């Protein structure tokens, strides 16, 4: 006669087998926990040098006329202006094109056209950013901007860089928005058609408002991506040594990321005097904080869509 | 208006109900939306055309094989991309060796084992955030940890600016994407499969090994290989961990010694070449980009081929 305890022990299985299961589980847990270690390592490696920078650098040099790290001028607002300019232009390009593509793919395209157009957009998403930088430098500036705006366009300029970054983010806006639009239940569309609404009215007044938080999320993610994009700006916007404060989009400029790349070019130059090396980590920490904030906010928006449907 | 129609007689009503009014605004809207997509396609086409036509002068005095196998140089007439080509390939192998096992294991834990606790939610949120961290920040991580801190191990003779440091950095950069895509494919495995396997007395590991992973394999393969393609195009983190942009010699170092030596990569070379003033380098950069795009096409093509093959078998 077996007691219930004995049955439980039997059902639990062979001890050696259970030990092995625990070991395997532990291994998988360790792999998952690595991601947390990476985050901690990122913050730790950034914070240390950033602190050295901020506690040693002359506060006056943080508001000087421009960003010239090797000369000890660290005006952060110069880089903020550049970053906002480039990311702003990028959003002007990516928002209409991305959203238009998303609405077409989700509301208008037949299954067959979708099957052709969607992979084509994904192809655009797979283009490396250095390639877009080269494209901005050798096509957008000379063949697109010069004919329109004339000779005021400098060879390296922020407008071309912004357009390049914008092209890079079109697929992102399109795919995240499309997901949000497609998540809107069919019943809403059918109700709208039942009331006699046209396809345009249904898309614009019913489906779009229902998906608006997902669309906003896609724009925030795209903005975050534009802020963090390095190579397009580093190649097409010039200004490797440093830059003066300015909003002129036809002239060279630097974003936070491009300034970091510029500091890193040439393997031995990163350890200049006057805390140029440490400024790299200070910028990195700022960038990390900004993109983290944007990503958290966009996540909130995405969750709102999921909750409703 | 309706009352007016009724007053006008039944024919008017019939016409109002049956005849299509021309919806000009609606058609314009449709055209505008389609134009948005077309602009995207046109950009892609222009980009490919610019790059390919721009590379033509470079092919006039060299073949693809001489271009790929020649050493990097400051002289545009003899410059090749060998170190960068070889460097990119070794970096990819490194990235795959780090990101694939670690990423797939992490995804298995999160999808199959993890209880719904605070810790699990923290890990999940953390991974999504890591995926959104700009690549250049990973470069700083690599610079601080693999180059400065562990430089003595990763590359004692090159101040840590070694293949190992670059590969580890790219591996960490790719890890969150691998975890996310793998977790997605695991989630798509039907629950009935798990229940059936448990029902015949499998342990959790047996369920995962014999049922979940094989069924999820096509999605995992595709996702991981596509993420490798993304790592292949990254230049920013490599600039920070010391990707070489000019000539350097590997000499006759063995493969393992070379891992602790200097490195270059194709995207890094695109960056430095596109900034050179000589006109000849324009064509060379375009040619280099053509090689890069061909490699990318091969990588992504493999991913799609694997997906189709496995899906047919399933």
Image (cartoon, coloured by chain):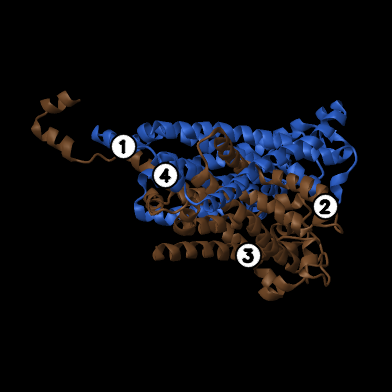
Chain to which mark 1 belongs: A
* The N terminus of chain A sits in image quarter: top left
Q: Nearer the viewer, mark 4 or mark 2?
A: 4
Q: Which residue is mark 2?
A: B151
* The C terminus of chain A sits in image quarter: top left
Of helix, strand and loop, which one carries label 4? helix
Q: Which residue is mark 1?
A: A189
Chain to which mark 2 belongs: B
Residue that protrudes farthest toward the front in the picture: A1
Q: For this rendering, which residue is in front, B92 or B112?
A: B112
| The chain in blue | A
**Residue at figure coordinates x 40%, y 34% from the top left:** A208
- Structural distance between the alpha carbons of marks 2 and 1: 60 Å
Q: Which residue is mark 4?
A: A7
Vertical comparison of B293 with A201: above or below: below
- Structural distance between the alpha carbons of marks 3 and 1: 45 Å
Which image quadrant for residue B278? Answer: bottom right
Image coordinates for residue B188, horizontal then vertical, percent: 43, 50
Image coordinates for residue B191, horizontal then vertical, percent: 39, 48
């Amino acid at each position: 006669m077996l007691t219930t305890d004995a049955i439980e022990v039997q059902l639990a299985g062979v001890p050696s087998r259970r030990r092995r299961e625990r070991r395997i589980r532990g291994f998988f847990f360790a792999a998952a926990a690595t991601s947390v270690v990476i985050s901690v390592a990122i913050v730790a490696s950034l914070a240390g040098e950033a602190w050295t920078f901020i506690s040693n650098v002359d506060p006056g040099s943080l508001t000087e006329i421009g960003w010239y790290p090797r000369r000890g001028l660290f005006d952060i607002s110069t880089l903020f202006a550049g970053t906002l300019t480039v990311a702003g232009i990028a959003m002007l390009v990516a928002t209409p094109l991305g959203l238009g593509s998303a609405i077409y793919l989700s509301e208008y395209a037949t299954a067959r056209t979708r099957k052709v157009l969607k992979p084509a957009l994904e192809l655009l998403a797979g283009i490396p950013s250095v390639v877009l930088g080269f494209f901005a430098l050798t096509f957008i500036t000379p063949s697109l901007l010069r004919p329109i705006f004339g000779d005021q366009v400098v060879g390296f300029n922020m407008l071309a860089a912004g357009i390049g970054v914008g092209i890079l983010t079109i697929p992102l806006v399109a795919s995240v928005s499309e997901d949000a639009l497609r998540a809107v239940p069919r019943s809403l569309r059918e109700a709208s058609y039942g009331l006699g609404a046209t396809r345009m009215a249904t898309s614009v007044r019913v489906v779009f408002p229902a998906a608006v938080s997902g669309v906003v999320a896609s724009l925030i993610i795209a903005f975050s991506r534009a802020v963090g994009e390095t190579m397009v700006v580093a190649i097409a916007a010039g200004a490797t040594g440093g830059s003066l404060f300015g909003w002129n989009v036809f002239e060279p400029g630097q974003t936070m990321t491009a300034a970091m790349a510029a500091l890193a070019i040439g393997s031995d130059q990163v350890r200049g005097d006057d805390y140029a090396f440490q400024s790299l980590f200070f910028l990195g920490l700022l960038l990390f904080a900004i993109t983290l904030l944007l990503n958290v906010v966009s996540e909130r928006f995405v969750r709102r869509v999921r909750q409703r449907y | 208006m309706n009352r007016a129609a009724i007053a006008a007689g039944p024919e008017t009503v019939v016409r109002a109900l049956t005849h299509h009014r021309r919806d000009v605004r609606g058609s314009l809207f449709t055209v505008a939306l389609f134009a948005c997509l077309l602009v995207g396609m046109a950009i892609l086409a222009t980009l490919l055309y610019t790059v390919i036509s721009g590379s033509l002068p470079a092919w006039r005095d060299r073949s693809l094989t001489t271009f790929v196998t020649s050493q990097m140089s400051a002289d545009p007439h003899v410059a090749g991309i060998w170190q960068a080509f070889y460097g990119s390939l070794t970096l990819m192998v490194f990235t795959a060796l780090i990101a694939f096992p670690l990423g797939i294991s992490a995804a298995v834990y999160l999808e199959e084992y993890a209880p719904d606790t605070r810790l699990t939610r923290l890990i999940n949120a953390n991974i999504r955030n890591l995926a959104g961290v700009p690549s250049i920040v990973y470069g700083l991580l690599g610079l601080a940890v693999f180059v400065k801190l562990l430089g003595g191990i990763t590359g004692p003779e090159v101040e840590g600016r070694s293949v190992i440091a670059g590969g580890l950095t790219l591996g960490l950069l790719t890890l969150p994407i691998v975890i996310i895509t793998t977790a997605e494919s695991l989630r798509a495995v039907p629950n009935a499969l798990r229940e059936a396997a448990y029902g015949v007395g499998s342990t959790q590991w047996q369920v995962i090994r014999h049922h979940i992973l094989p069924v999820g394999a096509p999605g995992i393969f595709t996702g991981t290989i596509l993420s490798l393609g993304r790592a292949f195009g990254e230049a920013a983190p490599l600039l920070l961990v010391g990707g070489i942009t000019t000539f350097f010699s590997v000499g006759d170092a063995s493969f393992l010694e070379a891992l602790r030596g200097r490195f270059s990569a194709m995207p890094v070379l695109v960056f430095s070449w596109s900034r050179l003033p000589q006109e000849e380098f324009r064509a060379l950069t375009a040619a280099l980009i053509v090689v890069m795009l061909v490699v990318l096409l091969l990588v992504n093509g493999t991913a799609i081929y694997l997906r189709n093959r496995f899906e047919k078998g399933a």
